[in-house]
Image: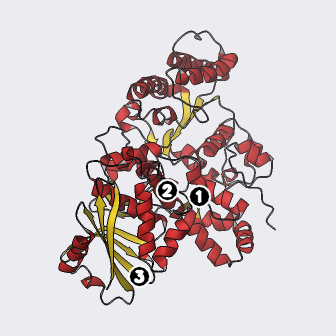
Amino acid sequence: MNSQLYPIGIQSFPQIRENGYLYVDKTEYIHNLVSSGKYYFLSRPRRFGKSLFISTLEEFFKGNRALFEGLAISRYAYDMEPHPVFHLDFTGRNYNTPGSLDAHLNSMLERWEEIYGAEKAQRAPEERFEYLILRAREISGKQVVILIDEYDKPLLETADHPELQEAFRDRLRAVYGNLKKLDGDIRFAFLTGVTKFGHLSIFSDLNNLRDISMESAFGGICGITEHELHSYFDDGVAAFASANGIGIEEAYGLLRQNYDGYHFAPVASPDVYNPFSLLICLTRKWIGDYWFQTGTPSFLIKMIKARHISLESLGKLEVRQSEIENVSFDMRSSLYPVLYQAGYLTIKAYRPETRTLTLGFPNREVEEGFFMQLMKVYAAHAEIDSGFSIVKFYDDVCEGRPQDFMQRLQSIFSDFNREGFNHVNLEQHYQDITYIIMKLLGFMTHIEYRTASGRIDMLVETPSFIYLFEFKMDKSAEEAIAQIDSKDYLLPFKADNRRLIKIGANFSSKLRSIDSWLIVEA
């Protein structure tokens, strides 16, 4: 039995080290940072270990040598003399009212003012912070260390409230501006966040920050690499395999399929596992959508729907590298940087000659969770009862029962609230929902599949069947089948040993559902 204690949700380095929890040693990265620079920024998805790394930096600069015994950084000669550390932690708070940010800033500043003096307590937060930095330097005789965890949380939470976001931006820019203004009094500064808000001028003002988010040397600074998985978790994986009645290699394959696949640099980037999901999975000993359950990208998904972004394209996007490095929530700007930096898409390939990246879903957990959230938005208010279950849809498609599948689909469409429809293009709306269902079932699915004579509306492949869907709006199912035949859509698949099934479906704008369909096996 595996008795290892996993630090699920624990972001305190001292608590992990002092209470016997497993610690994946990331202190070599601290040595690399401290010995090669002074100001850094790191973007990583939520729950990837940013806060734990900040906590580790804090203890290093406070000089708590005993916590680092036996770790990688103990091989290097550091005096470990304590420095004043200002840790601005924006996690664990909600920023949805005008006074919420200042209230949190005040709570942090007041703690430090008890130590270094409250002479400027009536001034603006940025002035108070400046005074505290100068006083800490004067009293200790040491340069200060500034650690800012989730610097962008107030901005992310106000993404759909531009006026409040603008006010928060101005406040944070003034507070963070001390990093440049007081350079001579600062020993080291490290900021973390999910996103890099280039358009909000925070980073243009802090042009002394080195962004290590996409540097291959720091690709494994957060998360669990394949090497670390085997170095620290072999016993846990063995226990997981035993509990599920599978072999060790199959267990590693399941973990890889569901939680691996993140790449944070265009080249020479290690495979990174989601640490939150991995630790919970090894503790509970079953596969689940753990990371996705801790927070859903409802704002992003609503914007995907509003912009009519191709759902199939999310699995394989070609973007310029520069396009994903800065985030903007302007309705005219691209959502791809947000999807990448938030961890819903990751780097799959890189073409150096054009400096373009291929982005895609990192693993099964993210892809399935993302499409489940899409279903909730695209099919808002639909009654998902026993007649609409993933298992029944799956069995219908796998076992060649398209009639039953279409009946279930008709039932789902009939339950929709009309407010959830894409009134501009109803046919596209129905096609998107059918695609989402097929992706949730795990089938190889293509929208607008190209052939020599045209495009098939949707192609679905299973081990035994190939389904060709043609959708019409306010026409007839017969016309849909006639189009499949007239354009010879079956030609590329006639040599395939699987059974070919043509499905023509007509959607009624009046009924807001499927009013007829025709199924023909080739």
Name the foreground residue: 436 vs 99: 436
For numbered disc 2, what is the local secondary structure?
A: helix
Residue that appears at 62% across and 77% down: 250
Q: Residue 372 carries which label?
A: 2
Taking the spot 59% from the left edge, 24% from the top edge, the residue there is 104
Q: Residue 465 bears which disc, if any?
A: 3
Label 1 amino acid? Asp
Q: In which quarter of the image is the C terminus?
A: bottom left
The amino acid type, in three-letter code, at marker 2 is Met
Residue occupied by mark 1: 289
Earlier residue among tags 2 and 1 = 1
Q: Is residue 448 left or right of residue 375?
A: left
Which amino acid type is shown beneath numbered disc 3? Phe
Q: Looking at the image, is 297 positioned above or below residue 505?
A: above
Q: x, y (%) of residue 520? A: 32, 81
- Say above or below: 500 vs 170: below
Q: Is mark 3 on a helix, strand or loop?
A: strand
Q: Distance between the residues labelled 2 and 3?
A: 24 Å
Q: How far apart are marks 1 and 3 (CA)?
A: 28 Å
Q: Would you say the residues marked 1 and 3 are in contact, meaning their CB atoms lie under 8 Å apart?
A: no
Asked if marks 2 and 1 touch (Cβ < 8 Å), the reply is yes
